[in-house]
Amino acid sequence: MSNLTFKSRKLTWLGAVIVIFMLFSFHANAQGCVAIRSNGSSCTGLSSHYDSTGWQVNTFYRYFKSFRHYRGTAEQTERVELGSDVRNYSNFVDINVVKHINSRWSMGLTLPFQSIKRTSLYEHDGKTRHATSATGLGDVRLSVYAMLFKPNRWGNLQAGLGVKLPTGDYNYQDWFYKNDTTYSFGAVDQSIQPGDGGTGISLELNGNVNLYKGLGLYGNFYYMSNPRNVNGTSTTRGGTASATALKYRTNVMSCSDQYAVRGGVNYGFHGLFLGVGLRMEGIPAEDLIGGSDGFRRPGYTVGVEPNLAYSWNRYDIQISVPYAIKRNRVQSTSDIQRTKDTGVFTQGDAAFADYSINLGFSVRIGSYGRQMMGMNSAGMSGH
């Protein structure tokens, strides 16, 4: 075998490794009432780069059930014991379409869809459990990606810049039960709204390092900045806002930033790929740009994320199941201000999931030449 042939095969194999283990980078939804939306998590740029141009289509599915309530890092176990917990049954489908311009540049379109059912007592009559739901298209995202270094066998770093468009309904409404003869019609909870009403700017960094004979490291960083302050959607579920809600502006929903960080180790052999890492997703109490008023549930979750994937020809399939090891519902700006005004510490709660199930399928379409080593991922996606 010639040295050139060996290097070509080495780069092709390494490219496959990157495809697999960055497919799941950020289906970020924070697994509960900390409302990260699917669009924010879908990185469409990390697709297989070749000498010639081509397309890649990636489909991702994510499911989780959130029900464990936390205030800070302390679980409110009585909520489950008493049956007063809020339960979100969340289903997300992201479709990523990637266009490869050359071995270093690509651009992508993310179409996020969701179907979420939410059951609770407090939103209805306070005594019996009833449901609301929200289904539809979320906020679409357009992104451009660039490899920061020439393709090489040791690894690479990719940067992405995107814009999130307010295509999702951010005032989705449903009926709330009051008694057998009375219902109110109003906006559903912020955590299940398909959109947030803001035009956002996303920044991504995705890197990999090849260590030794199939063993490698990967890392991903994602931040979505939402400059819009509030979107005007009422939080009263068809009712009237209280004086306290009006004073601290929690009567309307906030347009919050969101972030995700992921890193770990992977190993590949004969088309089968195994990996494990840590994953963190959340929304901050204060936005990077713009105001931070309105109702939001800031916080984050940290999880251990095992990965399993298989690659053959132009196709890749994957599964990952992040399991939460830490959950933290931090104080919002309204909580902080209310604490200062009253002298009584105030901190809202949020419901989190134990784990999420992520499935992905990728296919490369079009004319391709010799595969180049690069940040070859079909995409990344996520609540």
Image (spheres, rainbow, N blue to C red):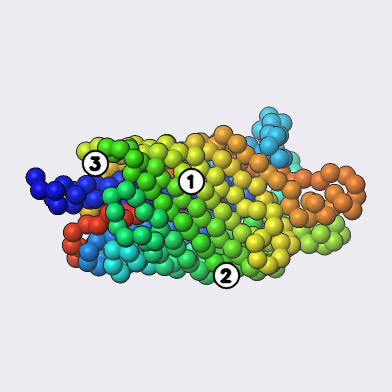
Q: How many numbered circles does the render carry?
A: 3
- In the displayed structure, does residue 29 sit left or right of residue 377? right
Q: Tell me the crowding category of disc 1: few under 14, some 14 to 19, or many 20 or more residues within 10 angstroms, Cα based.
A: many
Q: Quadrant of residue 325?
A: top right
The one of 177 and 13 positioned closer to us in this rendering: 13
Q: Quadrant of residue 251?
A: bottom right
Q: Quadrant of residue 232?
A: bottom right
- In the displayed structure, does residue 192 sit left or right of residue 62? right
Q: Is residue 112 above or below residue 213?
A: below
Direction left: furthest residue? 1
Q: Which residue is mark 3?
A: 271
Residue 58 percent across, percent down from the top left: 34, 56
Point 39% across, 61% down: residue: 148
| SS at circle 2 | loop
Residue 195 percent across, percent down from the top left: 57, 63
| SS at circle 1 | strand
Q: Earlier in the sequence, mark 2 or mark 3?
A: 2
Could you say which disc has been placed on residue 329 in the image?
none
The amino acid at mark 1 is Arg
Residue 234 percent across, percent down from the top left: 71, 63
| Separation of marks 1 and 2 at Cα, in angstroms | 25 Å
| SS at circle 3 | loop
Residue 4 percent across, percent down from the top left: 14, 52
Q: Quadrant of the N terminus?
A: top left
Q: Tell me the crowding category of disc 3: few under 14, some 14 to 19, or many 20 or more residues within 10 angstroms, Cα based.
A: some
Asked if marks 3 and 1 touch (Cβ < 8 Å), the reply is: no
The one of 158 and 75 positioned closer to us in this rendering: 158
Say which of marks 1 and 2 sits in front: 1
Q: Which residue is mark 1?
A: 262
